[in-house]
Amino acid sequence: MKQTSRNRFGAFSMVAVLGLGGLLPSCVPRPPRARSSVVPTTSTIVQLVNQQRAAAGVGAVTESSALDSAALTQSYNQATAQLMSHTGPDGSNAGQRITNAGYSWSTWGENVAAGQPNVNAVMTAWMNSPPHRANILSPAFTSIGLASLIGSNGVVYWTMELAGAGR
């Protein structure tokens, strides 16, 4: 009899410890997590964007760490939800995310994409899409930020934030 009560107490202690440590699965399903960052893309895409802008007679954009941060937030949102979207899970748009990242803007634009395996493929897709192309070539935008993440579904989610500085 002592052995049985000792086993029950031991099992209860283990469940309590695991439960407190957050190691047991909860009853509410957790959203899938983004796996990892894709190979460094920022400098390559900035270079490709500036090549396209130069060919169109538009001035170059410069990379902004604040815009990179806003782009990373949206790539994470997309990869976690496994859904390409301009809207964050809290209903935010790119302008709100850019502001939250600390960038003071007068105008902004956002390009998102999903499924392209590398920078050349995503740039081709964006340049073949009139609204995305217009963002890339807009002289109103002087700064750029980029990010890409792989969702747990294996899909690469891309975000490009473009903005013109506020006054």
Image: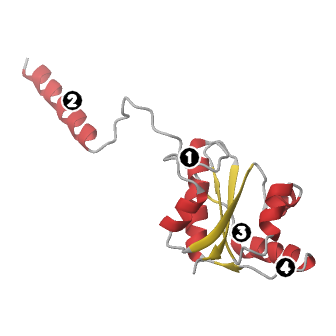
Dot 2 or dot 1, earlier in sequence: 2
Residue holding disc 2 = 11
Instruction: Categorize mark 2 by other alpha carbons within 10 Å: few (<14), some (14-19), many (20+).
Output: few
- Label 2 vs label 1: CA separation? 35 Å
In the rendered structure, which amino acid carries the disc numbered 3? Thr
Query: Where is residue 160 shown, x and y percent of the image?
Result: 69, 63
Side (left or right) of 95 relative to 43: left
144 shown above or below 29: below
Q: Nearer the viewer, mark 4 or mark 3?
A: 4
Q: Furthest residue to the top?
A: 1
Looking at the rendered structure, the secondary structure element under dot 2 is: helix
Task: Name the residue that disc number 3 marks.
Answer: 41
148 or 143: nearer the viewer? 143
> Residue at (58%, 62%) from the top-left corner?
95
Q: CA distance from mark 3 to mark 2?
A: 49 Å
What crowding class fits label 1: few (fewer than 14 Cα within 10 Å), some (14-19), or many (20 or more)? many
| Image location of residue 62, percent across then percent down | 70, 81
**Residue at (49%, 72%) from the top-left corner?**
102
Q: Are marks 4 and 3 in contact (CB under 8 Å)?
A: no
Point out residue 96 in the picture as x, y percentages from the top left corner: 53, 60
Asked whether disc 3 touches disc 2, contact meaning CB atoms under 8 Å apart, the reply is no
The tag earlier along the polypeptide, 3 or 1, is 3
Q: Which residue is mark 1?
A: 80
